[in-house]
């Protein structure tokens, strides 16, 4: 995960990075994080979201590598 891009006191922004590949930013509002970060359902949903983003980045890199050959 790569963090950055403070949302002017409103939330966080993070991206998934695999090598040189960088995913689209994910935005998290401060209030949502504060209210939900301790719940198993929220954490499980976030983990699934990150896994899906990582999978799509990996797949995109594999397709690009195959075209380059």
Image (spheres, helix red, strand yellow):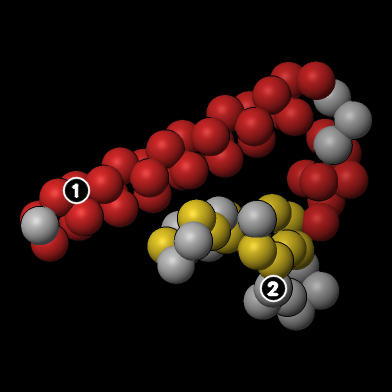
Is 60 situated left or right of 17 in this image?
Answer: left
Check disc 1 and report the residue beneath it: 63
Q: How many labels does the image show?
A: 2
Is 2 situated left or right of 58 in this image?
Answer: right
Earlier along the polypeptide chain: callout 2 or callout 1? 2
The residue closer to the viewer here, 30 or 53, is: 53
The residue closer to the viewer here, 54 or 39, is: 54
The residue closer to the viewer here, 62 or 15, is: 62
- Under tag 1, what secondary structure? helix
Q: Residue at horizontal 66%, vertical 76%?
A: 5
Q: Residue at horizontal 73%, vertical 28%?
A: 42
Quadrant for residue 20, please give it: bottom left
Q: Where is residue 24 in the image (x, y as percent from the top left)?
A: 45, 60
Q: Residue at horizontal 30%, vertical 53%?
A: 61
Instruction: Judge the density around disc 1: few (<14), some (14-19), many (≥20) Cα neighbours within 10 Å.
Output: few
Q: Where is residue 13 in the image (x, y as percent from the top left)?
A: 66, 64
Is 66 situated left or right of 50 in this image?
Answer: left
Please, is residue 9 above or below residue 42 in the view? below
Is 20 situated left or right of 26 in this image?
Answer: left
Check disc 2 and report the residue beneath it: 4
The residue closer to the viewer here, 19 or 10, is: 19
- For this orientation, the residue located farthest to the top is 40
Per the model, the C-alpha gap separating discs 2 and 1 is 28 Å
Instruction: Judge the density around disc 2: few (<14), some (14-19), many (≥20) Cα neighbours within 10 Å.
Output: few
In which quadrant will I find the C terminus?
bottom left
Q: Position of residue 56 (x, y in %)?
A: 36, 42
Quadrant for residue 48, please give it: top right
In which quadrant will I find the N terminus?
bottom right
Q: Can residue 32 be seen in this view?
A: yes
């Amino acid at each position: 995960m790569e963090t950055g891009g403070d949302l002017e006191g409103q939330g966080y922004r993070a991206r998934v990075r695999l090598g040189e590949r960088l995913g689209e930013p994910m935005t998290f509002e401060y209030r949502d994080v504060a209210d939900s970060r301790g719940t198993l359902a929220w954490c499980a949903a976030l983990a699934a979201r990150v896994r899906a983003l990582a999978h799509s980045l990996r797949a995109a890199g594999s397709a690009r590598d195959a075209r380059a050959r």
